[in-house]
Amino acid sequence: MGSELNKKKAAIIAIGDEILIGQIPDTNSNWLAIEFHAMGIDLLKVVVVGDDIGEILSTIKSLEKEVRLIVLTGGLGPTRDDRTKEAIADYLGYPLEFNQSVFDWIAEHKEKQGSRPNDLHKKQAILPRNMKFFRNTKGTAPGMLGEKNGTLIVSVPGVPYEMKSLMKEQIFPYLFDKIDLKVIRTKTLLTIGLPESEIAERLTEFENQLPKGLSLAYLPGHTRIRLRLTAASNDGDAAEKLLQDYVQKMYSVLGLTIFGEGDDTLEEVVGKILRQKGLTISTAESCTGGFISHLITSVSGSSDYYRGSVIAYDNSVKVAELNVPEEVLESDGAVSERTVRYMLSGICAKMSTDLGIAISGIAGPGGGSKEKPVGTVWVAVGYSDVQVVKRLNLNLDRKLNIEKSGLLALNMLRLFLLSN
Amino acid sequence: MGSELNKKKAAIIAIGDEILIGQIPDTNSNWLAIEFHAMGIDLLKVVVVGDDIGEILSTIKSLEKEVRLIVLTGGLGPTRDDRTKEAIADYLGYPLEFNQSVFDWIAEHKEKQGSRPNDLHKKQAILPRNMKFFRNTKGTAPGMLGEKNGTLIVSVPGVPYEMKSLMKEQIFPYLFDKIDLKVIRTKTLLTIGLPESEIAERLTEFENQLPKGLSLAYLPGHTRIRLRLTAASNDGDAAEKLLQDYVQKMYSVLGLTIFGEGDDTLEEVVGKILRQKGLTISTAESCTGGFISHLITSVSGSSDYYRGSVIAYDNSVKVAELNVPEEVLESDGAVSERTVRYMLSGICAKMSTDLGIAISGIAGPGGGSKEKPVGTVWVAVGYSDVQVVKRLNLNLDRKLNIEKSGLLALNMLRLFLLSN
């Protein structure tokens, strides 16, 4: 392997007896792998070892000639079990010594939490001399960086949110020039309503025309599919522009199938539209048993547009509370277009809301028939007098039939709001 | 390291380019680590490498002198990317050849799925000679086992449920004598209502008296804490008896704090009690917005005891639908003992159910006050005329305030049913 290749090669050493006995999973390596990949760093190997100086040291030595960057996670606690800094001091040939400025960070951090540093924290400030230290704003163990024979050694705590914050906010930016990273810009578009195969088909031409430096990843879920577009360039502005151009193209191909970006949730997006339009909503649920109402109210501030619901699991509740005529239940059944239409008008009237969602179906595993198999769900959304009605034919287990029909119903409301 | 020590030492090599680019996390190693630990196997190292013969081979060679068992996961697909079997053939010095009996397994598997084996499956039956093969009932790549210089080499597919099924049903039993494993029996008890520290305090004496071969692990969650008791012995009956004795002791210490075992859910347990007693239930929810109703109806067959709910998010719904007097809302507020008492009577009357759960609180982040901070939740459970009421003081984010108060309310109903 030539030095050109090595330049962007990296390895991870995840340290902790608790990982090897299965007490906690090593989730850090997957997070780092994703970040590395996006930045053009080639991850060669991940090694998980226990809190053992000899093992840590021999693992570093076995990797040093192959990679430019070794990230060690974990083993930085103040207890005697944690040995990472001793191994690093040994490897780099630096003595361990008390570091006053790191101790001051720790003291400040503890004071913010309303407590004081103790003897264990003093021990935590005993660190290899000559390293570069990065302040940990979320905990007491600092990030550290050293270099030997051209290989960068980075050490971060094993607590995931401390590790992520240190890497993202301090260490990656610091490493940027050292390993000639590319500037990466990513945007994740969230879709609902089309299966992955259908999205892939619609995006065939788009994908064929993707220029170098742009890549598209499908991150499928049961109901929502995330599409992550990544632009890599030597220049931040160029990466940003490339990304924006192709995000626009995806919007023009997929249109309203895209309901949001990044960490948006469907319930937040629907809530925003309701708030903008000044409309209120209620739900009448049978098969989803309160799941849609739970989704809507999981959004902070939803009381501005959400009034309440009737969960009409039993048919008698559909009649008494939602004014579904008994003869409709008898002739068409509870899982039928006419029933959900009545449920919708009923709930809008009862809760005095502009809009409603009504849903009735067979979640399974029991209750299916040849005409209405498990997974048959009728949904009505809209105003009391202007309704959109749809029959869903799902083919999942009970849990997923509930989740998917609830999300699709909420999405029907979104589409209704955007076109009415 | 002496040979005695090595006898039960193991390593895992997880193989796959997709792991190193972060596309999928390596969840297999954590599962194997837990199983190894329970069986008394000492996991020395986990190494993740790409689909590269050289890397796989050099990793096996670096581990062979240190461990008795190497488990390789992944890299067994039929595409040219997957190189594990070539590396193993190279290491063991066996040629690759078409294996008719493995191909017959694959053909049978495909026929069961209603399709036929194709050329890729023929390639998948080209395997190192002289290995022991284990039939994969869930996929097409078989498990394999070979031995060299006293080190056992096991290869299993990377698809988690195929890997688990092969290891659990076939490979661990086969390895049993070879590495002198212990028989393991485990039981997981599920608790709710006490924090981990309180459970640990109550179990102090129990833990101090645990005999050799028995261990207790805490698996904490936000609301429910799982306690896993593991018995290890050379003899299955002895392990079973030891386990049962100490499970009984835990029940006598923790009593009704234990709501179930293994994969039980609280909503199933409550459903079973309701069904046994022939009682029906409904819910009146404010802050949980339908979450309790969603929990109850996530249980298959819940229509036998669950009628329906009113989600009374808006105060006007509490008045109109649940007959909460306006003067109570004005004097005590919506989050108050009197309000939830009225909500409970109201929902039982409206839905004609024996029992009800009523809940009203401040999920946050807005809406808190000095007297009633975010996380204040009033719950009433019971009959219309016999009620248990409780104020919860949670201190979590919106999502967890909803989840935790919903689960605790359901648990209050469980305790009510068991004592009334």
Image (tube, coloured by chain):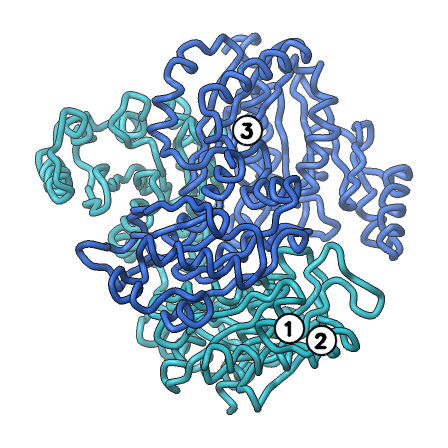
Chain colours: A blue, B cyan
Give the residue at mark 2: B326
Q: Nearer the viewer, residue A143 or A325?
A: A325
Q: Is residue A147 left or right of residue B33?
A: right
Helix, strand or loop at mark 1:
helix
Helix, strand or loop at mark 3:
strand
Q: Residues within 10 Å of mark 3 (few under 14, many from 20)?
A: many
Pointer 1 indicates a residue of which chain?
B
- Residue A225 placement: quadrant: top left
In percent of the image, x 44 and y 44: which residue is there?
B27
Mark 2 or mark 1, which is nearer the start of the sequence?
Answer: 1
In percent of the image, x 89 and y 55: which residue is there?
A116
Give the residue at mark 1: B319
Q: Are marks 1 and 2 in contact (CB under 8 Å)?
A: yes
Whether residue B231 is visible: no
In percent of the image, x 24 and y 40: which residue is there?
B144
Amino acid under disc 3: Thr
Q: Can you tell which mark lies on residue A188?
A: 3
Q: CA separation, marks 3 and 2?
A: 48 Å
Q: Position of residue B121 (x, y in %)?
A: 17, 30
Q: CA separation, marks 3 and 1?
A: 44 Å
- Residue B277 placement: quadrant: bottom left
Helix, strand or loop at mark 2:
helix
Q: CA separation, marks 1 and 2?
A: 6 Å
**A300 is higher (above) or lower (below) than B344:** above
Q: Are marks 3 and 2 in contact (CB under 8 Å)?
A: no
Q: Position of residue B370 (x, y in %)?
A: 85, 66
